[in-house]
Image (cartoon, rainbow, N blue to C red):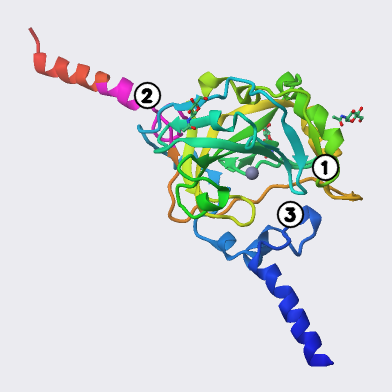
Amino acid sequence: MRIPLLLGITFASLPLVLQAGPWCYDSQGPKCGPSHWKEIMPTCGGENQSPINIDRWKAQWDKDLDEILFEGYDQAPPGRWRLLNDGHTVVLNLDGASAAEQINITRGGLHDTYRALQFHFHWGDLNRNGSEHTFDGIQYPMELHIVHINAKYKTLSEAKGHPNGLAVLGFLCKVSDADNTNYNTIVAGLKNISQADSYVELASTFSLSNLLPDMALLSKYYRYKGSLTTPTCDEVVTWTVFEEPIPLSKSQINAFIKTLYFKKLDTTSRMINNFRPVQPLRSRKVFASRDATISCCSPLAPSFFVPLFLYVLAGLFSGPS
Ligand SMILES: *[C@@H]1O[C@H](CO)[C@@H](O)[C@H](O)[C@H]1NC(C)=O
Ligand SMILES: *[C@@H]1O[C@H](CO)[C@@H](O)[C@H](O)[C@H]1NC(C)=O
Ligand SMILES: *[C@@H]1O[C@H](CO)[C@@H](O)[C@H](O)[C@H]1NC(C)=O
Ligand SMILES: [Zn+2]
C-alpha cells in the first residue's frame, strides 16, 4: 500500500511544480511569499528582476528617451469595463473591449508599438507605503501598472517568449489632501469586489489619461529592462517609471486597503501589502529621459553650459580690441 500511495503523491504534486503553482505575498503567509517564488518558478530568481530601486544619482541620461506617444489614451472607449478582484490585485482588462486595438504607446525609445492589455495596482497597509518601485529608497503609498503587449505578438504567452514582448508603465501614487475625482468610478467599484474572483461592470468607461498625472509631465521618466513583478516573473518587460506621482487622497488609498480580500469566502485575509520587494539591479543600468531629474548631471548641462562655454571661449579668442 505504501508504494502506490507515495507514487500517487509524487505524480499529484508534479503539475504544481510545472505550472506557476500557488504563490502569495508575505501578508498571506510566509511560506508562499516573494522569497519563495523562485522555488515555484525558477525565472523569479533571474538576473533581471523587477521591481527595483531607482537611484537617481546613478541614472544615466539618454537623449533617445523622448516623449512617449500615447494613442487612444484620451478617449473613453465604447462598451463596458469590468473591474476584477483576481485574488492578488484589482485589475481592469482592456483586452477584448472593442477598443483594444485603439489604445497603444510608441516612441519614447520603444522600438515598437505596444497595445494596452490591462491595468492594476499594488499597495501597502494603513501604516506603510506599498509601491513596488522606489525612488532613492523611498517607497510610495501605491503604484499603478499599465501592461502593454508588443503589437507584433498575438497573445500574452507568445509575448512572454520574446525579450521585447511587454512594456509596462509604472506610476507611483502620493497622498493628496483632496480626492482625485478621476478615480471615483474605480474606488466606488471596490466595495462590489471585496471577495476574490468577484467582478463588477463599471457604470462607464473613461479615458486612461484621466488616471494619470498631467500628460505634460509624462516626458519625465526612467527606463530599464526587467520582469513581471508576479510569477511567472518573465524577463520580457521594458519598464517605464514616471517621475510625477498620481495624487490620491488618504481615504481613496484606504479604500483599497480596507475593502478587499485575497480570498473567496474568507474575510480574515485582507488584501494588503501586495507588492514585491525591490530586486537587485546587478549589471543593469537605469536610463533617465531627456526631461527627467537626475541628481548628478542636470539635463540643463548641454543646453546651458555648452553655450556658456562657447561664449567664454569666444571671448578669449576675440581678445582685447
Ligand atoms: C494605435 O492606436 C491608434 C489610435 O487609437 C490606432 O489608429 C492605431 O491603429 C493603433 N496602432 C496599433 C499598431 O495598434
Ligand atoms: C510614503 O510616501 C510618501 C509620499 O506620499 C513619502 O513622503 C514618505 O516618505 C513615504 N514613507 C516612507 C516610510 O517611505
Ligand atoms: C454594488 O454594490 C452596491 C451596494 O454596496 C449595490 O447597490 C450596487 O447595485 C452594486 N453594483 C453593481 C454593479 O453590482
Ligand atoms: Zn504590477
The residue under label 1 is 198
Within 8 Å of ligand 4, the CB of disc 3?
no
Q: Residues within 10 Å of mark 1 (few under 14, many from 20)?
A: some
Tell me which amino acid carries mark 2: Leu
Quadrant location, the C terminus: top left
Q: Nearer the viewer, mark 1 or mark 2?
A: 1
> What is the residue that sits farthest to the front in this orientation?
98
Is 144 left or right of 31, judged from the image as shown? left
Q: Residue at x 52, y 31 (%)?
A: 104
Q: Which residues are magenta?
A: 288-306
- x and y percent of residue 194 in the render? 85, 40
Q: Earlier in the sequence, mark 1 or mark 2?
A: 1
User: Residue 92 appears in which quarter of the rendering?
Assistant: top right
Mark before the other along the chain sequence, 3 or 2: 3
Q: In the image, what residue type sits under mark 1? A: Ser
Residue 25 got which mark? 3
Q: Are marks 1 and 3 in contact (CB under 8 Å)?
A: no
For marks 1 and 3, give the one nearer the viewer: 1
* Residue under numbered circle 2: 300
Residue 85 is covered by the magenta coloring: no
Mark 2 surroundings within 10 Å by alpha-carbon count, few (fewer than 14), some (14 through 19), many (20 or more): few
User: Which marked residue is nearer to the observer: mark 3 or mark 2?
Assistant: 3
Instruction: Name which residue type carries label 3.
Output: Tyr
Which numbered dot is residue 171? none
